[in-house]
Image: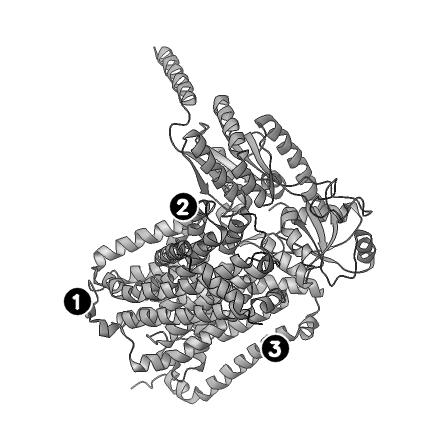
């Protein structure tokens, strides 16, 4: 008797589950952003507004910042896998396994990738105007016999890891000065307190154009269309970092029904490729890349490997 | 230097009806969220951001900026009436504003606050209009060593803030420093005093500290007191809200000095309004001939910090707009509002988009006039809050505090912190310690440490580096002079104090 009842219950649960997936979404969907306001949060809000407009769904964005996005990610990992709680995060997710001792989840096993949303542009290696070098070759020579400092937006941030990889691959010893924000690190390279910095294109271009910093090289395979006279790091005679540029993407808790994932994939793609939304995301210095779940999974796995290597190269011990 | 044509063009933009409407919406919302504890400009700007996608970029910025500086007007209202700082930068206003309210002079405090804020804000705007291009270089001229020296100066000046025992004040500064150390150390990435709580990895929010130490402790200690302030049972005539001639005479100097302090602090990205108001309060108390009145309802202690706070809110737009360097999260968010419209913030903004820059700066002044007009008639309404019986008022305050704190990070953990720090605040109050020195240690300590260690990394451990930086050296010498002065003046008062301390002979 008990067994039959058990089967019945299981069957009912399975049925209601399927029914839920069919008329998904029938209540508000929450996208949790593991960061404070700005950055991935702005993308999530742009996307949510467009998905609501095009599908009649009710997608809301909730910020749960803290511990380098670990708090927000944990909340999603623990949420019901019913498609009503999603995660918007950045490449910081890929650094968590290497950076955080207290991590309680595996990004590849406990989350299902839904779709990439955007990629950030590649970074420029820039130098303070007071540094007596004008190109990458000059920097390599100068740094062999002089102390050179570089800024970042924090220990373990991509600006830190990128420079650590650059130093390791080119046999340089550099002094790291972490700041609280990208803005502070940019101000510091402008006034010469720090001497070099990796900074993403949209932030680098205005200060390069005004002569506030000297562009040394572009950390990408091809030159940037908007600043064609700045060589790539390889062209300038040094080893590039080989690091991928950052990204923003949406994931769901493990066990989320495939129909729900498929629905979301489609909605995100349509929303992100709406010309208006695309223009706004590009304005923020990002490139729209709505992928599917499988592609995002590959990007995430590769990023976890390369970020792990970068964290070890930078000599950061997990906290 | 003064570009009259551009300023005129700016006013033309600011006076367009659509910009006037959005400016009003911005400052009105700003005042409102400023009054509500915890819900600050950052959350509001973030919620408004999607609306701005469909506005002209100048109009969008006019509204968002209005929220930003409007919240500084609103922040002082609850500080004065209920000892409930709307944000960290208005916590200093509690020190004398709340005693004034208890003496039935809330109207005067609010009036002086509005006028001081207006003067501070206006001066900041004039500075921007006339010298923004020249100040652009100044905003990034400071390195860690100068920031460190400024914090030392701030700490030395703040030594005067305690009104009770200096030793107890020092103990509170130390406690504040310790709580300020909680979280991830910027220089090494190592977490300190987090006890394994992920929620402490980013440290304790300053707004939680301010609301717990001032707000919660006040509510808890007032539970046993009479139902309402008797002073307000009868009708309050408008005349009693106007400052007396004596109030005006006492406020003039503090407003001017606060404006100067706030303007300078605001130009330095990342320092913030809390440091500006702390420094202004400390300065006023130090140069006052009657420092013993401070903490007991001295109008100077309201006028100075509020002017400083608002001047700094205005001049903090200088690094953001002229260099693209945001001083904080709210500023960074406003920059992304520009970027979404395809306008790249940075040193070229003033030249490439003069309409946005000058329109925005002119709208600041329009917004400040609106705030003044909005706030003065509101004083009478705000004061009526004090007529609400405590048994209705206190639960409402607690609910608002909790909602506000929760909204900071959508984190229940922050509520537990509020409770723990609130109880700490109540206990230290019972033991006759003061919360202000705690706040000083909490705000200045971590900034001082971060910048000192970074400066030492740059100098490779050579303390002689300080001698090679003229601005830093000047600030450190000023701090040393302040310390010497306070020791000397302490000695002068000594004969009297010793007699007071000596035990009474037993009869």
* SS under mark 3: helix
Quadrant in which the N terminus of chain B appears: bottom right
Image-quadrant location for residue A308:
top right
Image-quadrant location for residue B505:
bottom left
**Numbered disc in front, either 3 or 2:** 3
Q: Name the residue located 32 percent from the left edge and 79 percent from the top edge.
A: B247
What is the distance, in whole Å, between disc 1 and disc 2 at their CAs?
38 Å
Using the image as rendered, state which of residue A119 and residue B62 is in the foreground.
B62
> What chain does mark 2 sit on?
B
- Measured as percent of width and height from the top left, residue A316 is found at 66, 47
Q: Which residue is mark 3?
A: B474
Q: Which is more N-terminal, label 2 or label 1?
A: 1
Using the image as rendered, state which of residue A5 and residue A128 is in the foreground.
A128
Q: Residue furthest left?
A: B234
User: Can residue B194 be seen from the camera position used here?
Assistant: no
Q: Are marks 3 and 1 on the same chain?
A: yes
Q: Which residue is mark 1?
A: B233
Q: Which residue is mark 2?
A: B412
In the picture provided, is A81 more to the left or to the right than B474?
left
* Looking at the image, residue A48 lies above or below residue B189: above
């Amino acid at each position: 008797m008990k067994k039959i009842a058990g089967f019945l219950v299981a069957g009912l649960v399975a049925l209601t589950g399927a029914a839920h997936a069919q008329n998904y979404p029938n209540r508000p969907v929450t996208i949790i952003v593991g960061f404070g306001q700005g950055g991935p949060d702005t993308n999530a809000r742009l996307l949510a507004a467009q998905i609501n407009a095009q599908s009649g769904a009710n997608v809301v964005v909730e910020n749960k910042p803290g511990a380098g996005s670990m708090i927000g990610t944990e909340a999603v990992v623990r949420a019901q896998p019913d498609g009503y709680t999603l995660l918007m995060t950045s490449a910081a997710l890929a650094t968590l396994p290497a950076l955080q001792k207290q991590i309680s989840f595996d990004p590849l096993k406990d989350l299902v990738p839904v779709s990439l949303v955007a990629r950030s542009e590649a970074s420029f290696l820039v130098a303070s105007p007071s540094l007596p070098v004008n190109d990458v070759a000059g920097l390599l020579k100068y740094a062999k016999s002089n102390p050179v400092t570089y800024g970042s937006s924090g220990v373990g941030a991509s600006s830190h890891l990128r420079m650590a990889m650059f130093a390791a691959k080119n046999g340089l010893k550099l002094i790291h000065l972490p700041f609280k924000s990208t803005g502070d690190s940019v101000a510091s390279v402008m006034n010469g307190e720090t001497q070099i910095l990796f900074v993403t294109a949209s932030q680098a271009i205005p200060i390069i154009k005004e002569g506030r910093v000297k562009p040394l090289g572009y950390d990408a395979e091809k030159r940037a269309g908007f600043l064609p006279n700045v060589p790539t790091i390889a062209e300038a005679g040094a080893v590039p970092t080989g690091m991928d540029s950052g990204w923003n993407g949406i994931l769901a808790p493990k066990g989320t029904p495939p129909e729900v994932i498929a629905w979301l994939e489609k909605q995100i793609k349509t929303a992100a490729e709406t010309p208006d939304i695309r223009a706004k995301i590009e304005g923020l210095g990002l490139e729209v890349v709505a992928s599917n779940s499988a592609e995002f999974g590959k990007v995430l796995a590769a990023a976890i490997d390369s970020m792990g290597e970068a964290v070890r190269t930078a000599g950061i011990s997990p906290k | 230097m003064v570009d009259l044509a551009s300023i005129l063009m700016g006013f033309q933009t600011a006076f367009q009806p659509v910009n006037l409407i959005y400016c009003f919406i911005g400052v009105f919302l700003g005042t409102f969220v400023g009054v509500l504890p915890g819900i600050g400009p950052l959350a509001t700007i973030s919620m408004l951001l999607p609306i701005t996608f469909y506005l002209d970029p100048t109009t969008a910025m006019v509204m968002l900026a209005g929220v930003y500086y409007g919240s500084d007007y609103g922040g002082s209202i609850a500080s004065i009436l209920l000892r409930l700082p709307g944000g960290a930068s208005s916590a200093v206003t509690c020190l004398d504003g709340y005693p004034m309210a208890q003496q039935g002079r809330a109207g005067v405090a609010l009036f002086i606050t509005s006028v001081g804020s207006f003067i501070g804000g206006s001066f900041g705007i004039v500075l921007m209009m006339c010298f923004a291009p020249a100040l652009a270089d100044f905003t990034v001229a400071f390195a860690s060593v100068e920031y460190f020296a400024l914090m030392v100066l701030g700490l030395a000046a703040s030594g005067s803030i305690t009104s009770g025992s200096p030793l107890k004040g020092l103990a509170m500064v130390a406690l504040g420093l310790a709580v300020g150390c909680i979280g991830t150390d910027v220089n090494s990435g190592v977490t300190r005093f987090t006890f394994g709580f992920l929620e402490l990895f980013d440290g304790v929010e300053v707004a939680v500290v301010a609301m717990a130490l001032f707000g919660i402790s006040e509510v808890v200690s007032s539970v046993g007191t009479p139902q309402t302030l008797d002073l307000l049972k009868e009708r309050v005539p408008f005349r009693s809200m106007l400052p007396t001639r004596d109030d005006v005479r006492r406020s003039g100097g503090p407003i001017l000095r606060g404006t100067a302090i706030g303007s300078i602090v605001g130009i330095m990205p990342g320092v913030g309004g809390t440091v500006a108001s702390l420094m202004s309060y400390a300065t006023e108390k130090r140069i006052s001939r009657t420092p013993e009145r401070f903490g007991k309802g001295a109008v100077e202690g309201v006028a100075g910090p509020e002017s400083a706070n608002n001047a700094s809110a205005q001049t903090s737009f200088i690094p953001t707009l002229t260099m693209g360097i945001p001083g904080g999260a709210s500023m960074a968010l406003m920059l992304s509002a520009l970027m979404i419209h395809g306008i790249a913030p940075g040193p070229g903004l003033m030249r490439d988009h003069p309409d946005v820059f000058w329109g925005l700066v002119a709208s600041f002044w329009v917004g400040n006039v609106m705030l003044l007009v909005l706030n003065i008639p509101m004083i009478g309404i705000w004061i009526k809050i004090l007529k609400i019986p405590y048994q209705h008022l206190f639960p409402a305050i607690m609910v608002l505090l909790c909602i506000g704190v929760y909204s900071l990070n959508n984190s229940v953990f922050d509520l537990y912190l509020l409770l723990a720090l609130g109880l700490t605040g109540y206990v230290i109050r019972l033991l006759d310690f003061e919360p202000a020195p705690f706040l000083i240690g909490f705000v200045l300590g971590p900034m001082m440490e971060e910048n000192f260690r970074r400066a030492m990394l740059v100098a490779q451990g050579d303390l002689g580096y300080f001698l090679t930086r003229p601005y830093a050296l000047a600030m450190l010498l000023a701090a040393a002079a302040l310390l010497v002065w306070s020791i000397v003046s302490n000695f002068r008062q000594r004969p009297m104090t010793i007699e007071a301390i000596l035990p009474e002979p037993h009869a």
